[in-house]
Image (cartoon, rainbow, N blue to C red):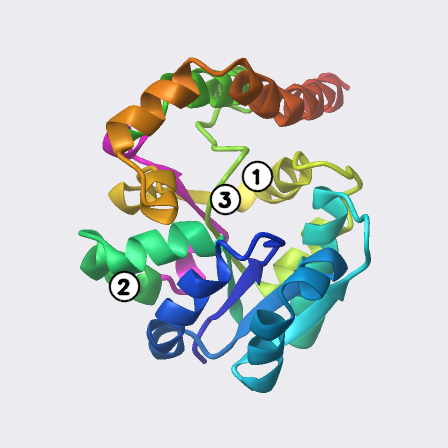
Amino acid sequence: MRAAAVIPMHDPEGLLFPHLEAVTPLLKSLFDRVYVSIPQETRARQAKHAAWVDRDEFFQVTGIPAGAQIGDHFRVLYQAAAESAPPEQILHLCYIDRVAFALCGPFKDQFRFDIQSVGESVVPLVFHRSPSAWETHPRNYYEIEHMATRAGEMVLGKTLDFGWCHLAVQAGDLLTALQCSHNHDLSMVAEIVIALESRLHTQEVDWLAWEDPFILGRSASKLKHEREASLQEVHKRLSYIVPILNLIDKSTAVLLK
């Protein structure tokens, strides 16, 4: 059985849909189907793009109510995909900007190989950003997200990317993990990692290099400098890393019992 992809599409500005359309033929060569969510705000502002997705039977579309927070958005999509897929089917939880960059850039062959190599014996599997991939990201991204990684190393004895960009998991295991997910913000992705932690595999990959310059059509060096100087970017990342640190701290309390 071929794997399926699970991709949230919060895109009211219409920046990501063209990338989705461009790589859909490649997605069809890799996956059995794509479970995709379209929030009401996105559907209202990007009606033509949403209608294109609706028409293609390759996509199974989940609607997201207006005003849903990001964690609730993801949870509704993940729940719908996990309930629709056979329990043993591998689901790739991922993001279209990361996938489009991986499929259209210098890492496309390695990405395809890594995705097609994922089997039942290695899932659940988090693809980690390699040192080379992290080097392309703004330094503040790395420093803030590694607060959680270092805390997890001390508490769980494992090096884990709690704010992961790509997770492969069987549908039945995802359903079980979602029972432990309650947060409304982006930290819900860490709840999934913590729920799966005892059986979780990891693999470092270069294809999770920073995707924003590709998506935005910007100079990587200039954009990186802007983001490293941005207090708003620091706040954005702290807004989900602080709740993730709280989740790791709760794990400490459980382990001490």
Q: Is residue 144 above or below residue 206?
A: above
Place of residue 20 in the rendered image (x, y in percent of width and height, measured from the top left):
44, 65
Q: Crowding near pointer 2: few (<14 within 10 Å), some, many (20+)? A: some
Structural distance between the alpha carbons of marks 1 and 3: 5 Å
Structural distance between the alpha carbons of marks 2 and 1: 26 Å
Q: Is residue 178 above or below residue 142?
A: below
Residue closer to the observer: 196 or 10: 10
Q: Amino acid at mark 1?
A: Glu
* Label 2–label 1 contact, CB within 8 A: no
* Label 1–label 3 contact, CB within 8 A: yes
- Report which residue position mark 2 lands on: 112
- Report which residue position mark 3 lands on: 200
* Label 2–label 3 contact, CB within 8 A: no
Place of residue 215 in the rendered image (x, y in percent of width and height, measured from the top left):
38, 48
Q: Crowding near pointer 3: few (<14 within 10 Å), some, many (20+)? A: some
Which residue is pictured at 27% across the width and 32% down the height?
A: 220
Place of residue 69 in the rendered image (x, y in percent of width and height, measured from the top left):
76, 43
Place of residue 244 in the rendered image (x, y in percent of width and height, measured from the top left):
65, 26
Left or right of residue 110, residue 151 in this image: right
Residue closer to the observer: 107 or 67: 67
Residue closer to the observer: 26 or 111: 26
Residue 197 is tagged as: 1
Q: Earlier in the sequence, mark 2 or mark 1?
A: 2
Q: Amino acid at mark 3?
A: Leu
Which residue is pictured at 66% across the width and 19% down the height?
A: 242
Q: Which residues are magenta?
A: 118-134
